[in-house]
Amino acid sequence: MYGKGILTGMKVTMARFVTTYLDDLRMLGRRYYNPAGIEYRRSKDAKGIFTVQYPEEKLPMPEEFRFVPFLIYDVMPDGSHQDRCTSCGICAKVCPPQCIWIEQTTNPETGRPVPEPVEFFIDIDICMNCGYCAEYCPFDAIKMDHNYELASYDRHAYHIFNKERLSQPAEYYAGIRPANYSREEAIRREKEAKKAAAEAARAAKAAE
Amino acid sequence: MTEMTAERKLSALEERFPGKVSPDARPGYEGFTVAPKDLLEVATALRDELGYDYLSSVTAVDYPEENVFEVVYHFYKSTGGRALVLSAQTPRNKASLPSLTPLYPAADFQEREAWDLMGVKFEGHPDLRRILMWEGFDGFPLRKDWKEAYYEEEHKPFAARWPEGAVRRSEDLNAFSGNVAYSKEFMAQPDKYEEEAEPLLYAKLNEEAEKMGRNFETDFVTVNMGPQHPSTHGVFRMAVMLDGETIVALKPVMGYLHRNHEKIGERNTYLHNMPFTDRLDYLSSMSNNWGYALAVEKLMGNRVSVPERAEYIRVIMAELTRISNHLWAIGFLLNDLGAFFTPSLYAIEERELILDIFEATTGSRMMCNYFRFGGVARDFPEDSWNKLKDLVNERLPRRIDELDVYLTNNEIVGSRTTGVGVLTPEEAIAYGMAGPVLRASGVPYDVRRADPYGIYESFDFDVAVRYHGDCYDRYIIRMDELRQSLKILQQAVKRIPAGSVLDKNPYNVRVPAGESYGRVEGPKGELGFYIVSDGSANPHRYHVRAPSFINLTALEKMCVGQKVADVVVILGSIDIVLGEVDR
């Protein structure tokens, strides 16, 4: 019969229409504007309306999500800030669109480079959020951020981020990427312990 | 096909043409060289005697030191097997070669591209106009001595970034002073200058129309569909000559999204290119990553090896990409048919869940940048692994069946697509069609089976094939491929071993000199990356064999004789992405 295919198809649409309301009623008040509801809507059992009402609702960010990078500083026991960045320049070299500018200084007395950047710029209009800088940084000094709401009224005035704008404490990093942070911290502690052990051994040898 | 038999076949070519064809002696090169005057003869024999009927890729390479352009051809047999690479050289100042388009229509757009970007003339080409740049553009942008508007340095990384770090915007450079060339005609009379593209295009349309026979009762009408047209899924234009409502001739006009991807690729280091490949076919970045990784890994040879777990993850990601791409293609084909957004939104729901997995694993929904030379960037986090298992075992099969019930037997879909835009198997091969378009025409050619890469040999799946070659078959074959991809995914999820996912990951990748062509079966067809390395940190030549672009070669063939409304459906059934067409 001509039209049978269309009718069978319409049944699918009809079923979808009905489930939307059934689901809404079943989860009355819990389906929208709350984290459990959002989680349900992106699960394998989700039926009905899929849409997340941004900006009133926001999808939870998975840990690996990457957006424009930021720099990490450690807060020292005396309260001072210590940049992790040593201005080695690897991030600037691996950056595919070349949006990272690093100004290195040399100690005027010794003439050797100081392991801390004077300035660090990222042009966020050019950054393609690839994550290479974070991946290849040997000091865990630059990481990808979760904050994607960076729009502003004047890109010329605000879209080149300097070191001050880019810097975040290590706790911030631990907050957005807990699994990565604890893994990297474990490796750092292990390295430091090894270094301390080697130094102790050297000192012991010197004492002999 | 094993190494041995391939070798024997290749030497058959030498025996057939003693003195005319010789193996490429340069280290790292795998092909044969032929003199331009013998090119047509050799190519004819390849097609008619040796069975290499599928011309996959044509591209030109600039060798300024030797003062030559080299045009490289990759031939395949449509029954499967390895490539036969043929190359011919022509002097730089008088670059000209015989065109292969009369023998292999697949060369049509690719030779136009080589003319457009490299300035190699192809004698005997029926329609040698620029294709990506506009007519009146001065210079050939892929030549090594051509410099782009924001030119900074020959190769990345740029010296200005570190250690001085003198930040500035590239737009603050005076873009149009020293490094942009205008044509002499333009400079003579800028306000009176008129580019020749339109007259040339319409002349070509008229020429085709004359062949069809104009008569006195009716006149032909020229209609421009696009560049802004909802059916084109981007910025794409078709100049159509109509007799009433019937199409007499059609010429696609493209390049509106052209960004000289290949030149960018040659300025980049090998590693830099990976995120740029995401932006080709932006719906299937994982497949693009794989094609590029494959080409570079081929060049690196035994310097790199991919751990087994990474091979499995590559397959999983590529097949998930295929599913999300085909869902998108089916959804938007229905949009083109006039079923406005209900089917496509049903299809996109499932894609959304796949993108959630991509985001949790790679860090981005679409621009995944996930593959590295020697593996993948990182392993699955546990929650996204569980999500993946639920998706491929439970939800996706259910939803694909629902989509099937919803659309496949729909009478309107049937009457709009059945018998529309037919391509015979012979035509599909001659025009170099790839992917679902080729297989819907009854040619069971799938790179995953014809020339296996990765670990596809160890999976049990069928090459989907349909035999009518019309739009309906191009729809239904995507349904078939969805199910085959699920089959692969279910096996992969079950069998995946534990272990590391990345061999080593240096930031300064070094690649020995030579050439390589890595190809994968992307969702849209054979996606190939041709790379020439001179041993430095940056590729000497980086070329993308874009399936969307080459599948458009047969667009006119499919459309002529159909009604104007069918053009929309035919274009939708090819499934193009303009990011890849225009590159």
Image (tube, coloured by chain):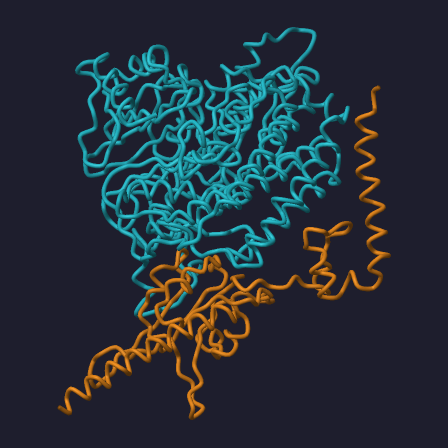
Q: Position of residue B65 (x, y in %)?
A: 19, 39
Q: In this view, does B33 lie to the left or right of A93?
A: left
Q: Is residue B271 above or below residue B454?
A: below
Q: Position of residue B106 (x, y in %)?
A: 44, 22
| Quadrant of res B135 | top left
Q: Is residue B331 left or right of residue B158?
A: right
Q: Which of A44 and B339 is in front in this view?
A: A44
Q: Position of residue B361 (x, y in %)?
A: 52, 56
Q: Where is residue B533 in the image (x, y as percent from the top left)?
A: 27, 42
Q: Chain A appears what colour?
A: orange
Q: Is residue B277 above or below residue A139?
A: above
Q: In this view, does B454 lie to the left or right of B64?
A: right
- The structure residue drawn at horizontal position 58% and vertical position 29%, both measured from the top left corner, is B574
Chain that is cyan in the image? B
| Quadrant of res A29 | bottom right
Instruction: Report the label total.
Output: 0
